[in-house]
Image (cartoon, rainbow, N blue to C red):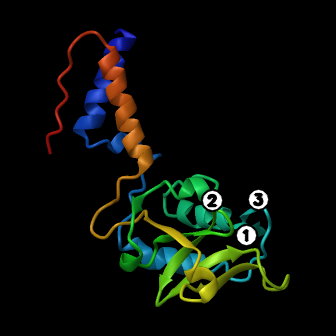
Amino acid sequence: MSIRFLKRAAAVLCLWGSTACFAQEIAPAHAEAVPSLLNKAKEYLGVPYRFGGASPKGFDCSGFVRFVFRGFGVELNRSSRSQATQGEKVLPGEIQPGDLLFFRFGGNRIGHVGIYLGGGEFIHAGSRGDPRTRGVRIARLDSSFYAQRLAAVRRLISAGNRTIGTLEQKSVQALVQVLAADDSPVEVGTTR
């Protein structure tokens, strides 16, 4: 068998199976997972803030969010700035529990992330304030400090079915490029 044949066969099988072969890049999470995810996040209340931290010994904001979502099969980028490009954009008036909230602290760059709990509250690994209270805690989204700095909301877990994230889209685009580079025609079916 030629390598070209194997690439084409893999491409056809992946697209036919609705790209399920990209499982390591796609979160098969559903709305039913949100309460469990939020409860898991709350288990880490009080864990201290640690710059660059990504474990229960200490978290920074993006490390905390990444750690919690990873436990539910959702792979996130490491920084809050790059996490803000993942998932589906949500309007501020449509925020649901489990959505990621992104904040700007001075300037235009995203610099903080938390997980919306509902009821106007979110959980995050905060680095501001008294050194004894820095770490994983619950804050009010409607506080003047956070309300003025909310920059974006992203959804990684969608009600009813999974949200297609940017990683899956890039994988499908890369797959199409592999097929396009092949000089012989290929029919790709997406029957389901």
Quadrant showing the C terminus:
top left
Q: Tag 2: Cα neighbours inside 10 Å, few (<14), some, or many (≥20)?
A: few
Q: Nearer the viewer, mark 1 or mark 3?
A: 3
Alpha-carbon span between mark 1 and mark 2: 27 Å
Residue positioned 62% across, 63% down in the render: 67
Amino acid at pointer 2:
Arg
Which one is nearer the viewer's eye here, 61 or 55?
Answer: 61
Most foreground residue, 7 or 156: 156
Q: Which residue is mark 1?
A: 56
> Where is 29 relative to 75, above or below?
below
Placement of 68 over or under 9, stated as above or below: below
Residue sitting farthest toward the right: 131
Residue ID at (64%, 83%) = 145
Image quarter hosting the N terminus: top left
Residue assigned mark 2: 109
Secondary element under disc 3, as helix, strand or loop, is loop
Seen at 33% across and 60% down, the residue is: 162
Q: Could you say where residue 157 lies in the image, as x and y percent from the top left? A: 40, 66
127 left or right, relative to 18: right
Label 3: how many Cα within 10 Å (few below 14, some 14–19, many 20+): some
Of the image marks 2 and 3, the number of the one nearer the N terminus: 3
Q: Position of residue 90 (x, y in %)?
A: 39, 68
Tag 2 secondary structure: loop
- Image check: 97 left or right of 77? left
- Name the mark nearer the viewer: 2 or 3: 2
Cα separation between marks 2 and 3: 18 Å
Name the residue tied to disc 3.
52
Q: Percent from the top left, x then y, of residue 114?
A: 58, 73
